[in-house]
Amino acid sequence: MNIKVDIKPEMQRRVTAIAQRTGLSESQIIAEALEHGRSLDWQERFAEKVGRGIAAADRGEFASQAEIERVRSKYRPS
């Protein structure tokens, strides 16, 4: 089913920006908001946090080897 909804230009800009940043389509962004209650504010914050996390990992600021080993040990079979 296709539904046409007129939205304000500012909201369209936000949807477009989220879509470009996340690699999702504009329709997927709107569906996330409708189906899962993920507002544009929530999606913008989520994309920003993911972006910061990726940038930190790229700089080598992800986790120390000891921290990684601690998590790996936690989930190893006994």
Image (cartoon, rainbow, N blue to C red):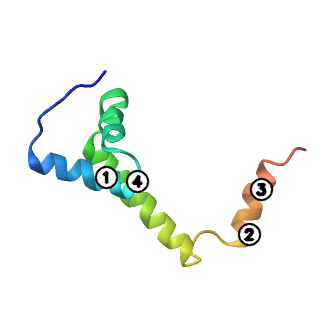
Task: Evaluate if marks 3 and 1 touch, with contact meaning CB atoms under 8 Å apart.
Answer: no
**Quadrant containing the N terminus in the rendered view:** top left
Q: Picture coordinates of residue 58 (x, y %)?
A: 55, 74
Considering only order in the chain, which callout, 1 or 3, is on the residue closer to the N terminus? Answer: 1
Task: Evaluate if marks 4 and 3 touch, with contact meaning CB atoms under 8 Å apart.
Answer: no
Considering only order in the chain, which callout, 3 or 4, is on the residue closer to the N terminus? Answer: 4
Disc 3 is placed on an element classified as helix
Q: Spatial distance from mark 4 to mark 2, Cα to Cα?
A: 31 Å
Residue 66 has which mark? 2
Q: Picture coordinates of residue 61 (x, y %)?
A: 56, 74
Q: Picture coordinates of residue 51 (x, y %)?
A: 43, 63
Residue at 42% of width from left, 53% of height from top? 23
**Disc 3 versus disc 1: nearer the observer:** 1
What amino acid type should be assigned to the residue bearing mark 2?
Ala
Q: Which of 52 and 6 is in front in this view?
A: 6
**Disc 4 versus disc 3: nearer the observer:** 4
**Disc 4 versus disc 2: nearer the observer:** 4
Among the 4 quarters of the image, the one containing residue 25: top left
Task: Evaluate if marks 4 and 2 touch, with contact meaning CB atoms under 8 Å apart.
Answer: no
Task: Evaluate if marks 1 and 4 touch, with contact meaning CB atoms under 8 Å apart.
Answer: yes
Task: Evaluate if marks 2 and 1 touch, with contact meaning CB atoms under 8 Å apart.
Answer: no
Q: Where is mark 1, residue-wise?
A: 18
How crowded is the residue under tag 4: few (<14 C-alpha within 10 Å), some, or many (20+)? Answer: some
Among the 4 quarters of the image, the one containing residue 36: top left
Q: Where is mark 3, residue-wise?
A: 72
